[in-house]
Image (cartoon, rainbow, N blue to C red):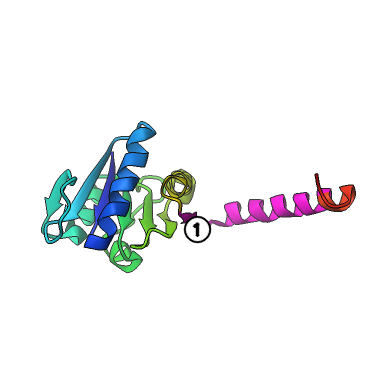
Amino acid sequence: MIAIFSLAQKSVAIAEKVKSVLLAEGFDAELICSEKISCDSADEKVKSVYHAIKESFKAHKNIVAVLPMGVLVRAIEPKKKTEDPWVVCIDENGRYVIPVLNGHRGANEFARLIAEGISAEPVITTLYEMQNQIREEEIIQQEEDNTGGGA
């Protein structure tokens, strides 16, 4: 199960779109919104999104949060890399999708999937991914240099 959280009214449409993308790809997803906002498509409305994130993380649910990263980071309490669920954060404008925890265990893949589905930019920062990106760019540049500028 993937728990999607929306804290503010302006993020509801993005959270709903994320849920649609994940459901269309065959994943189980639920939308959890603050009871203080209008969110008719919520599967659950909660008094405290912060506590709901904390409980979902403890229950090993993967998390997509459309809210400030500081709130998300304070709510999760990572214990063990090999057991913790992955966590992705989306800024409230829906411009960036950022893997926060366990990039190699699913967060990077889901950040890309969600970013494509909502027309956002994935922000991947894991060392392995960054090194591979640099290598790919170097290979492309070498090929262009060897062929006189590309295809």
Q: Residue at x 48, y 44 (%)?
A: 109
Q: How many marks?
A: 1
| Percent coordinates x, y for residue 135 in the rendering | 71, 52
In-front residue for pair 22/73: 22
Q: Secondary structure at mark 1?
A: loop
| Percent coordinates x, y for residue 26 in the rendering | 36, 31
What amino acid is found at the position of numbered circle 1 in the picture?
Answer: Val
Q: Which residues are magenta?
A: 120-143
For the N terminus, the image quarter is: top left
Image quarter of residue 75: bottom left
Q: Residues within 10 Å of mark 1 (few under 14, many from 20)?
A: some
Image quarter of residue 98: bottom left
Q: Residue at x 33, y 54 (%)?
A: 79
Residue found farthest to the top = 26
In-front residue for pair 112/86: 112
Give the main secondary structure of the magenta stretch: helix
Q: Residue at x 84, y 52 (%)?
A: 149
- The residue to which callout 1 is attached is 123
| Percent coordinates x, y for residue 115 in the rendering | 45, 50
13 left or right of 55 in image: right
Image quarter of residue 95: bottom left
129 left or right of 15 in image: right
Q: Would residue 138 be counted in the magenta stretch?
A: yes
Q: Residue at x 28, y 66 (%)?
A: 71
For the C terminus, the image quarter is: top right
In-front residue for pair 8/59: 8
Q: Would residue 46 be counted in the magenta stretch?
A: no
